[in-house]
Amino acid sequence: MRLVSFIPPNGGPARAGVLLGDTIIDLAAAAPLVSEDASDVSWDMLTLLRADHPEVNLATAAEIVQAVVNLMGSDDTATAGDFDWHGGLTIGDTALILPVTQVRIVAPLPQVIALREFDAFVDDRTAALRQAAGYWVGDRHQPAFRFAGHTAIYGPDERIELPTMAPLDCGMALGCVIGRSGRDIAPEEADAYIAGYLLVNAWTVRDPLLNARRPRDFATSLGPWLVTPDELEYYRDDDGRLLLTLRLMINGREVGYYHTGLMRFTFAELIAFASQDTWLQPGEIIVSGVAAGGCLLDIHGDSGPWLRHGDEVVLVCAELGQLRSSIGQLPE
């Protein structure tokens, strides 16, 4: 499934849905197809991951998707994306599917419980460059992370305002969302705790002294959707690494790319390390760290140039979508 959080046409809080072609299945609206008990429950993404209600969980979401697909006259989600939504699919007066053009897609997980940012996408050369410029790098031989600000979360197509403190840099990364509570998780069991994967743009203020005093609390963009592990099983190697290509586009020009098969540690290893002597909870995000070549520091060095007002930054992955952000400036 490709899970999304969206604001419906009539406004209100973000709701969880599933992307199907150019439409979104509204899980709350379609819940009566599989369970009367789940129809009056909050269907936001965090509630879905936590399974606060016995009928509101990822398994039920998959059942809802199949029920909607069956109503469309198909038995395959791959072909159901061609459904003509103009004809309508409703329960009473409630639409079960909505065209993407009529809703506002926000960050897949608008309420993040915690952001643990590792440094697993960096080769030795890039690590040396970043360290020489005065920025944190993780251990080369074992996982290491730092916490990032989890309340400054932005979604696809949301504008990032330039900071007043120092220049701004982007940071192409990959994240996995924790879907089950766990402590002291073994690496061979850790994949079962992943609810899905998403693109992450780890925005960084480019001042090494300031960065050391308040690391990565400026902003983080997530999206455009959360892809469940079963959708990506084909792209996994024997060691558990995903084999995906991430691309960094600035103002329509590709300036960097990274193949995730080069990841220094697997997400299972990162989860196992993060859970030692502590609990991981649904809604936490494990971030790979900024990919080698995935920021302007790697591309241009520590003198920039950096992002400017009017720039557009897009992270692209064929399997995970496009995370687009515009750069703005606060009015004086």
Image (spheres, grey):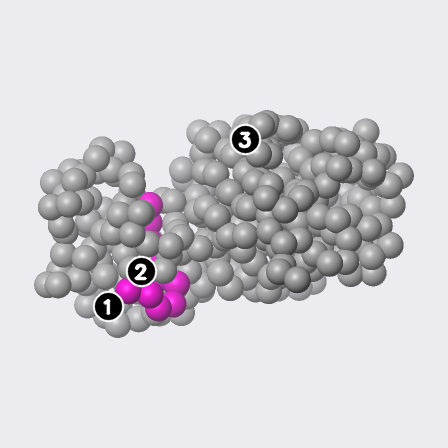
195 relative position to 169: left or right:
left
Whether residue 191 is visible to the viewer of this picture, yes or no, is no
Q: Secondary structure at mark 1?
A: loop
Earlier along the polypeptide chain: callout 2 or callout 1? 2
- Indicate which disc residue 8 carries: 2
Q: Secondary structure at mark 3?
A: loop
Report the quarter where the C terminus lies.
Answer: bottom right
Q: Are marks 2 and 1 in contact (CB under 8 Å)?
A: no
Q: Which residue is mark 1?
A: 39
Q: Determine the image quadrant of residue 60.
A: bottom left
The magenta segment is: 10-19
The verdict on residue 54 being magenta is: no
Nearest the viewer among 297 and 141 is 297
Within-10-Å neighbours for mark 2: few <14, some 14–19, many 20+: some
Q: Position of residue 193 (x, y in %)?
A: 51, 52
Which residue extends farthest front?
Answer: 332
Q: CA distance from mark 1 to mark 3?
A: 43 Å
Residue sitting at x 64%, y 29%: 256
- Indicate which disc residue 286 carries: none
Q: Position of residue 16 (x, y in %)?
A: 36, 58
Q: Which residue is mark 3?
A: 252
Residue sitting at x 20%, y 55%: 96
Q: Secondary structure at mark 2?
A: loop
Q: Determine the image quadrant of residue 285.
A: bottom right
Three-letter amino acid code at the position of disc 3: Gly
Residue sitting at x 83%, y 57%: 210
